[in-house]
Image (cartoon, rainbow, N blue to C red):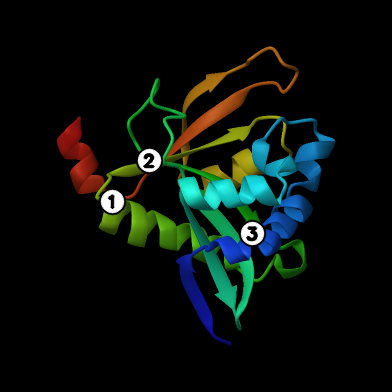
Amino acid sequence: MSEQFRLAELKDAERLQAILHEAYALIRELKLNWPAATADVAQVQENVEQNECYVLEADGRIVATITLSKADEVKAVTDLPFIKWFAVDPSEQGRGYGDKLLAWVETAIIRDRVGAPAVTLGTAEKHPWLLAMYKRRGYESIHSFDSGSGEGPMHLLRKIVNPNVYESMI
């Protein structure tokens, strides 16, 4: 089996939208207002154009995606890079593709190319397993808030990917 990490292209938008729609079904059921959960193809194209959207291909087929945001979504809390729109094709889950893509982005992109000491992402406390999953992967909550929208507490999580650089900054 061949696997390849790469930047997404506009021609990938339909496949990415299908993965996001299927993978984020529970997000919609929980009534979490996450843009990736309801994104149409045009919004996925916009994400690909405005951010760094990465994919993992297995045997030439996209099986997972994650986005390194270029927006200032978390600048009020931290200057660290923020990742979002992380999804694995549900028919491919359990094969380690999500772990591989996330680990690759954390090291090859965030640590090695960007040079950041840590990375952030957001999740909802009311999701039954996401917060625990990220904590098992070394993420810690650095900020939580409740917008009052009914979504419940949201968490901004951080993972240190380069401890030497991180320690020199504090």
Q: Earlier in the sequence, mark 3 or mark 1?
A: 3
Question: How far from the left and from the top, in percent, is residue 151?
Answer: 72, 23
Question: How far from the left and from the top, in percent, is residue 94?
Answer: 69, 67
User: Residue 134: in sight, yes or no?
Assistant: yes
Q: Which residue is mark 2?
A: 81
Is 122 left or right of 113, judged from the image as shown?
right
User: Residue 137: in sight, yes or no?
Assistant: no
Is 143 left or right of 166, judged from the image as shown?
right
Is 142 left or right of 117, judged from the image as shown?
right
Closer to the camera in the image, 40 or 83: 40
Closer to the camera in the image, 7 or 151: 7
- Comparing marks 3 and 1, which lies closer to the viewer? 3
At numbered mark 1, what does the secondary structure look like: helix, strand or loop? helix
- Residue 31 picture quarter: top right
Q: Residue placed at 53% from the left, 53% from the top?
A: 48
139 up-or-down from 12: above or below: above
**Three-letter amino acid code at disc 3?**
Ala
**Three-letter amino acid code at disc 1?**
Val
- Comparing marks 2 and 3, which lies closer to the viewer? 3
Closer to the camera in the image, 18 or 120: 18
At numbered mark 2, what does the secondary structure look like: helix, strand or loop? loop
Closer to the camera in the image, 79 or 164: 79
Q: Residue furthest bottom?
A: 1
Q: Which residue is mark 1?
A: 114
* Disc assigned to residue 13: 3
Q: Residue placed at 53% from the left, 21% from the top?
A: 144
Mark 2 surroundings: few (<14), some (14-19) or many (≥20) residues within 10 A: many
Q: Earlier in the sequence, mark 2 or mark 1?
A: 2
* Callout 2 touching callout 1 (CB < 8 Å): yes
- Residue 82 picture quarter: top left
